[in-house]
Amino acid sequence: MRRRSVNRIPLLIVTVLSCIALIFFSGGGALRGLEGLVSTPLNALAGLFSGTSRTVASLTAGERTYEELEAYVADLETQLARITTELVELRETGADYQRLADLVNYVAQNQNQEVVAADVIARDTVRALRTVVINRGVRDGVRVGMPVVTGQGLVGRVINVSANASRVQLITSEFSSVSARTQTNRVEGAVIGLASGALRLTLIPQGAQVQVGDLVLTSGLGGNLPPDVVIGQVTSTRQFQSDIDQTAEVRSLIDFDRLEMVLVVTSFEPVDLSVFEPTPEP
Amino acid sequence: MGIFYAFPIMIAAAVLQAVFIPQLDLIGVGPNLIFVIVVAWALNAPLPQGVVWAVVGGIASDLMSAMPLGTSALGLAMVVFVMNALGTQFYQLGILVLLLMGLFGTFFYEFYRLAMLDFFHLVGYIPADAPFVITWGSDIPTVIAPVMLYNVAMILPVYVLLRRLQRRLPETE
């Protein structure tokens, strides 16, 4: 630090109070409009760069094939640049095709649902929150609470919407809980996210039969999500006599760290059950 | 003059943090670029300037997150104040202080952010339908410790780059 006499205490008080006021107003939702306005150009920037980052990631991810390519290119030195470029482009196209095929497959299987396809353009700077930003917002018909899926299953729910972008809370978030049931025995429970990014099926009644390999689907209970959307597969179960219920580890088929394209189910509206909640006596 | 650099640099850092760092796929966590830049800049800047960098960086970070605005700004500003207070005691130990700030500052900052997550969940500032519980026993080695190592690894090259920029700035503050 440069040695210069600065009275720290007033600066500290002003900074802390300003930040607390900002947190209070932002957390309470008073700054939602302003935040949406300011984050719009940031989201646009993120969208602009997300394509580039994927290309970089695909280059680093494809080390093995690249080595194979190097051996091939040794015979064809003059074509090195062209072939490398073509390969990267083709790999990207192939990956895009696979993702689109999955999405089209989902749409074909769920023709009663209206969906909007979206690109993932940013991830939460606080990893523990596990949210992503997609490039579809109010203008595209996206609303808070809408489920987000891919061909492999449930991704999460929209928790925040601006004009041209939305924030999606992933099911792997520790803030997420999804009513679920197993496909074979229809055993019900709740899938929660863990700090590690894994999924756990909890609240399974003692004595209920959950088998490794069972598919876990949304149950639709609570009205927050449509029923029968795939969440994942049971990889192990835990049952202690002393516990009220048992738990099972669930592995999603989705690689949430490499999520690029998703579908927002715009025809689904979450049910508001708050009217059935008991109101406290005056 | 250094204050004005905070805006483009921090916005760029926030976009990098949200778009590029997750693509690195580093065991589920990555370096905190915004923290590293704030610490590296504040080490050789006047306190008010360091605080502005912390606030701008924090707000940029929160805009790319579901965290309420100001959360990261408060944490980063606290780090800068602590750095300033400690910096006067260890003036001669530049690089060592930088690395120690990177290590312990990251611990404090990440610990603070997890604690704030818990608090925001309690007061309903973050949309949640699950009982969020911080398991400090597992979160410190799996979430905080790797970020500490990444930040310490990054802080020296970032410091060198920013120091070059700082030397070119006129001494107006």
Image (cartoon, grey):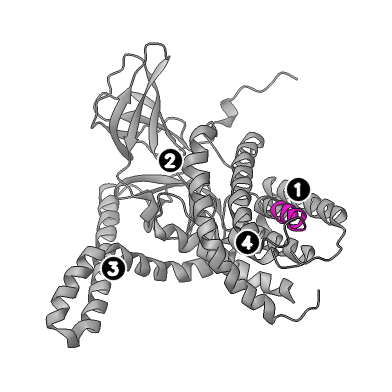
Question: Which residue was labeled with disc 1?
Answer: A20
Write down the residue under mark 2: A196
Tags 2 and 4 both on a single chain: no
Q: CA distance from mark 2 to mark 3?
A: 29 Å
The residue lying at 29 percent from left, 47 percent from top is A152
Q: Identify the disc placed on residue B60.
A: 4
Picture coordinates of residue B30 (x, y %)? 47, 54
Instruction: Using residue B29 as the reference point, say whether residue A69 is left or right of it.
Output: left
The reply to whether dot 3 and dot 4 touch (C-beta < 8 Å) is no
Residues at marks 1 and 3, common chain? Answer: yes
In the rendered image, residue A241, in percent from the top left (x then y), is placed at 37, 11
* Number of residues whose C-alpha sits closer than 10 Å to that of mark 2, classed few (under 14), some (14–19) or many (20 or more): some
Callouts 1 and 4 close, C-beta under 8 Å: no
Which stretch did the figure color magenta? B78-88
Query: In front: A227, or A8?
Result: A8
Question: What residue is disc 3 on?
Answer: A92
Q: Nearer the viewer, residue B104 or A39?
A: B104
